[in-house]
Amino acid sequence: MVKNDTSDARLLQLPKVDLHVHLDGSVKPATVLELARRQGIALPADTAEGLLPYMQVSDDCESLTEYLSKFQFVLRFMQQAEAIERIAYELVEQAAQENVIYIEVRFGPHLHTQEGLLVEQAIEAALAGLARGEAEFGVVARLIVISMRHESEVVNAPVVAAAIRYRDAGVVAVDLAGDEAGFPASLFRGLFAPAKAADMPITIHAGEAAGAANIEEAIEHLGAKRLGHGVRLKEDGEVFRIVKNRGIPLEMCPISNMQTKAVSGWGVYPLRDYLRQGLKVTINTDNRTVSDSTLTKEYALLMAHCGLTIEEIARTVQFSVEAAFVDETARAALMAKLEQACRELGIALQA
Ligand SMILES: O=c1[nH]cnc2c1ncn2[C@H]1C[C@H](O)[C@@H](CO)O1
Ligand SMILES: [Zn+2]
């Protein structure tokens, strides 16, 4: 059994970077209790523990589609600016508790407009919560704006446009998430063209619930600079070479990948092979509540099940710093923090 508190205490102390974490998948159950009371919404349970079955997937989750069904419950409580601000702030707080030094939080602003909030207001609320968290906890926190695959171009185009307008205010990239098997990347070439034209970084969920063709499409036609998951890259040698030769980072999320059945188990999880074959692999949580994840836990599971060393874990954090959507001054500061801590912890980093 691998415990949440890992056997190597250095894992908790290691400075971390979370490049792929969804806001609505990382809401604390205790916060839902309070928001429901304040918003006058009835709940199916009256304790944080009792809410978990509604907010977390179980081990017998069969697919990404089933995994995605968990988000409906929590989105009901995230329709007001105040709630979004608080949840963003609390996500930075959760990250700080395990020594995350940089976090890119992602959310789909249109999902928060069911009660009249504007996309812009949702973005501003998330940015305000991240800024408050950054000021209080010292974790540099930025926002990625998501378009959802099941939404029409009429809904998604203004989301991408808004993301571009908020670029200087803390939105660092745009993303495409949701049902990958039902909505291939090729449907979204037009959607991301304005982001490409504005030189706004693009990351795309690809190769999670569908094959490597989506990865190729995301890179060649949507303009992806990073890939969400990319687990199924190994299915196509040519696409593998494209990702490797261009140094495109993979935002892998191991626990989530097990739950959505992107792979059939830890024994065939390709992360270590990808790393040893020279891919820029990063390790992320995806959804801290839905997946019951922390980075510390992801690292411990990878060491236990896939044989990663703590040096390899630190190497992935280095890749995360290199892949972060920040300016070079901020990147250098993050790298210096990581290097200093690794020296103190006795973890050898690659030069
Ligand atoms: O792992 C994922 N793959 C695809 N879509 C996802 C994943 N995790 C969360 N989402 C979706 C559900 C959320 O409501 C949405 C915005 O965060 O993004
Ligand atoms: Zn994701």
Image: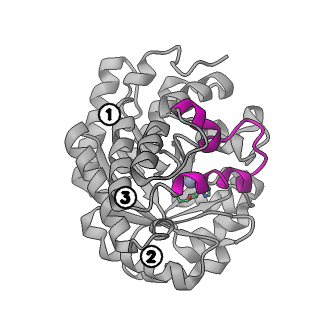
Quarter containing the N terminus: top right
Q: Nearer the viewer, residue 43 or 185?
A: 43
Q: Secondary structure at mark 3?
A: strand
For ligand 1, the image quadrant comes to: bottom right
Q: Secondary structure at mark 2?
A: helix
Q: Amino acid at mark 1?
A: Leu
Q: Residues within 10 Å of mark 2 (few under 14, many from 20)?
A: many
Residue at the spot 72% in from the left edge and 61% down from the top edge: 212
Residue 58 belongs to the span the image colors magenta: yes
Horizontal arrangement in the rendering, residue 151 relative to residue 313 (left or right): right
Q: Amino acid at mark 3?
A: Leu
Instruction: State the image coordinates of residue 238 (x, y, percent, origin top left).
Output: 71, 62
Instruction: State the image coordinates of residue 131 (x, y, percent, origin top left).
Output: 25, 52
Q: Nearer the viewer, residue 237 or 10?
A: 10
Instruction: State the image coordinates of residue 104 (x, y, percent, origin top left).
Output: 39, 52
Checking the image for residue 338, the label placed there is: 1
Range of residues picked out in magenta: 48-75
Q: Amino acid at mark 2?
A: Val
Most frequent secondary structure within the magenta stretch: helix
Return the residue at label 3: 143
| CA gap, disc 1 and disc 2 | 34 Å
Q: Secondary structure at mark 1?
A: helix
Q: Quadrant of residue 307?
A: top right
Q: Nearer the viewer, residue 29 or 151?
A: 29
| CA gap, disc 1 and disc 3 | 22 Å
Return the residue at label 2: 159
Residue at the spot 38% in from the left edge and 61% down from the top edge: 80
Residue 136 seen in the figure: yes
Q: Residues within 10 Å of mark 3 (few under 14, many from 20)?
A: many
